[in-house]
Image (spheres, helix red, strand yellow):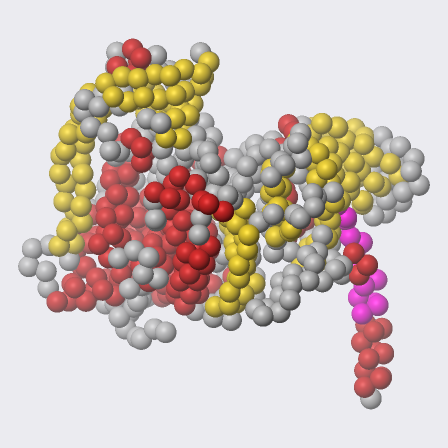
Amino acid sequence: MLVALGAVGAHAQISENALQPAAVHYRVSLADSAAHLVHITMDIPAGAAERELQLPVWNALYQVRDFSQYVNWVRAKSSSGRPLTVLKVDKSRWRISGAENGAKIEYEIMADLPGPYGAQLNPQHAFFNLAEILMYPVDARASPMQVSFADAPSGWKYATSFAACAGPEAVASNFAAPGQVRTPAPTCFAAENYDRLVDAPVEVSVFQEADFDEGGGHYRVVVDADPTDYDMRKIVPMVRRIVSAATTWMDDRPFSTYLFVYHFPHGARGGGMEHANSTAIDVEAQVLASNPEALPEVNAHEFFHLWNVKRIRPQSLEPVDYTKENYTRALWFSEGVTSTVQDYILLRSGLIDQRRYLERLADQIATLEGRPAHRTQSAEESSLDAWLEKYPYYRVPERSISYYNKGELLGVMLDLALRDASKGSASLRDVFHWMNQNYAQQGRFFPDSEGVRQAAEAVGHTDLGWFFQEYVAGTEEISWDGVFKSVGLRLVRRPVPVADLGFGASANHGAVPTVAWVVPNSEAERAGLAVEDVIVEINGHNAGPDFERWLAPLRPGDTLRVRVRGRRGQRELHWKLGSREEVEFELADVDNITPQQKANRDAWLGGESQGAARP
């Protein structure tokens, strides 16, 4: 009986394999790291005589970045070695003729965009968001994919969440259980299709690593940085607390293993990029040392993305269009409300306390109120306009708001509105559970803002059309005291004198700030500062995405020294700061706060509903 079953199983497997399309295989050579040049060989199986190859125009950020600008040349030959004609169709697409029996395509691409949003090869490491270097056959995007790496320097290891290739390419995996001996890492990795292939970054270097088990999941922590800039003994416990708090809050763990890849560079860059079963995070070494919240904050945010946006995903982002923008109105939820939950996770994990949480929340309110565009641009419109964020003027306060910022506040507002309407029995947590069960776990995508509304109304048993009309699709002014009344808080506004910089600047994701405007006849203008100048240094500190932290302590009468580069070349500028009035915000107890308001606040800040006990 066992033999017979085995024979049937083998026959079924052969039949199933016969129906499987042949795999596309990539070979990525790391030989020319000094010049940042990646040599890629791509084998495509037999098919149509004419095949088109596409290199994505965007990845990792909602910005068209045209990675084909880095392609030096493309060549092709048949399976018998005969040269094939390669015709460039547009800026990022190539057509190969004579490929009916398969073809080998070779091309060279320069990779020196640092992580977590880039692809970089240098003598220290290789880090790849693979969509930025790997073309795909347009007619075989859904085919199985394999990528192998070659010519890495001796001692370099591989970190990725891919499965190792099966068959003759395979070697034993290095995802050993605690206490087991690690075997050599694979150099060939497999994915079921191109979309899965490019949803896992790859780090290749002499990195340091640790791992741990928590709640049934296995976590791998990889750091490629100067060992003097970090302490793995502090990073691992922090990560453990975050993953425990997040998986408990969601009552779900949709993976068996998860990979954290960290870089702590010297230089102005930072940020995090989420993937299905991994994340890549950059925090500048100086920021890591001086700001204890920097790493936990981005960790909590990127880890929660494994649900919100990777699995609880808006329909408008599917399928991914690698040739042009994917517009969505739902980034206020997918990104902004992820920031809401990020801080709930930090609270539940004990990495911040209630006082600090309320300070951070008041800062978010101040940010929104300080941008005049909150009266003209809605959260949905900000989501649609994400593709404009690479332009400095778009980011000025009079032109735009941030879907991160307003979305985070909308998440808090929706949480409190649900709690009020349900007398404490429903909350934002229930919204995510409902969406996880009805969309993610069913393999479905939610219909943008309308899907969030449906979920919220389903768990709260109340009409929330007014909320989405006024605050998500609209620009209604928010009555903050009304929002926080049930939890016994009021918003205190205090006018305070602050330093008048004489200019405004903003930083794109992970980038250095760019001057968006200069006040006419100001000291900044007289010093020579100009629009579109890139600020490299502020008072001796590298100016990165969080450049405001070096400006915030300045007071009227202080001297500001900046190093900039622009159309006039690189310059050192300095000027004395004037004074202007700004409003400072604080969330404080209401007068005569009641026991019920205190109980409501404790439940809210604990991330719990009041109607039933939670694990």
Residue at image coords 83%, 67%: 15
Q: Quadrant of the C terminus?
A: bottom left
Residue at image coords 29%, 68%: 609
- In the figure, is residue 74 to the left or right of 261? right
**Residue 22 on the magenta span:** yes
**Residue 428 on the magenta span:** no
Residue 140, given in percent of the width and then of the height, sits at 74, 47
Residue 520, given in percent of the width and then of the height, sits at 28, 13
Residue found farthest to the bottom:
1
Q: Quadrant of the N terminus?
A: bottom right
Is 313 located above or below residue 520 in the figure?
Answer: below
Which residue is nearer to you in this view: 614 or 580?
Answer: 580
- In the figure, is residue 39 to the left or right of 291? right
* Quadrant in which residue 20 is drawn: bottom right
Which residue is nearer to you in this view: 384 or 363?
Answer: 363
Which residue is nearer to you in this view: 285 or 340?
Answer: 285
Residue 609 shows in the view: yes
Which residue is nearer to you in this view: 127 or 225?
Answer: 225
Is 30 located above or below residue 303 in the figure?
Answer: above
Residue 333 shows in the view: no
Residue at image coords 51%, 68%: 213
Residue at image coords 34%, 48%: 292
Give the total number of marks visible in the rendering.
0
- In the figure, is residue 105 to the left or right of 352? right
- Which portion, as a residue range, is magenta? 13-26
Residue found farthest to the left:
592
- In the figure, is residue 453 to the left or right of 167? left
Residue 43, given in percent of the width and then of the height, sits at 80, 44
Residue found farthest to the front:
228
